[in-house]
Amino acid sequence: MIIDANITMKAHVIATVRSCFAALRQIRSVRPALPQHAVLTLIGALVVSKVDYCATVLVGISGRLLDRLQSLLNAAARLIYLARRSYHIRSLLYDLHWLWISEHVKFRLCPLTFRCLRGTALSYLADSLR
């Protein structure tokens, strides 16, 4: 069962990365005609929302899969600021108020855990918390 879950998560991450990089390529083609705030809105809607979807189930996946998602966010940040690949990404992510993907997963999991411990979450979630 655990092996099937790992394969499913790997397939989910690969599909997410593939579709998001395709969206980034399309945004890159129209980037010169758009102001920065419009590019930020497009990337937020087409890329970041897909990475954010079901982020809590990414807990415990391999570092390699997390690195693939992180490279996606790095490419999105570079496209927003028109930065070169050699430019340090930490300052770009900081300016966008984006977390590293591993921190983002934990950030999404903490409120869910808090609600489970307080008894305000759905019962099946609270029952599965160990």
Image (tube, rainbow, N blue to C red):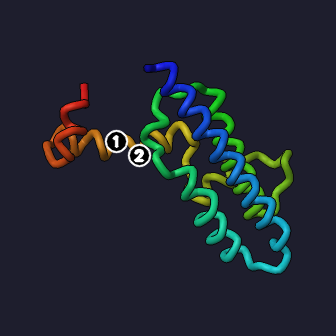
Mark 1 surroundings within 10 Å by alpha-carbon count, few (fewer than 14), some (14 through 19), many (20 or more): few
Q: Please provide percent x and percent y for residue 41.
A: 62, 71
**Picture layout, residue 38 above or below residue 74:** below
Number of callouts in the render? 2
Q: Which residue is mark 1?
A: 110
Instruction: Write the residue at 24% across / 30% down.
Output: 128
- Tell whether 37 sits left or right of 120: right
- Res 49 → quadrant: bottom right
> In the figure, is residue 32 to the left or right of 21?
right
SS for tag 1? Answer: helix
**Residue at 54% over, 32% down:** 8
- Point out the image quarter for the C terminus: top left
> What percent of the width, then of the height, locates residue 123?
17, 41
Q: Could you say which disc has been placed on residue 58 in the image?
A: none
The residue shown at (61%, 53%) is 94
Instruction: State which quadrant residue 1 falls in.
Output: top left
- Callout 1 touching callout 2 (CB < 8 Å): yes
Is 21 placed left or right of 56 in the picture? right
In the rendered structure, which amino acid carries the disc numbered 1? Cys
Q: Point out residue 64 in the picture as x, y percentages from the top left corner.
A: 66, 28
At label 2, which amino acid type do we have?
Arg
The residue under label 2 is: 108
Real-space CA distance between mark 1 and mark 2, rounded to the nearest whole angstrom: 6 Å
Residue 62 image position (x, y, % from top left): 58, 25
User: Badge 2: few (under 14), some or many (20 or more) residues near its Cα, within 10 Å?
Assistant: some
Q: Secondary structure at mark 2?
A: helix
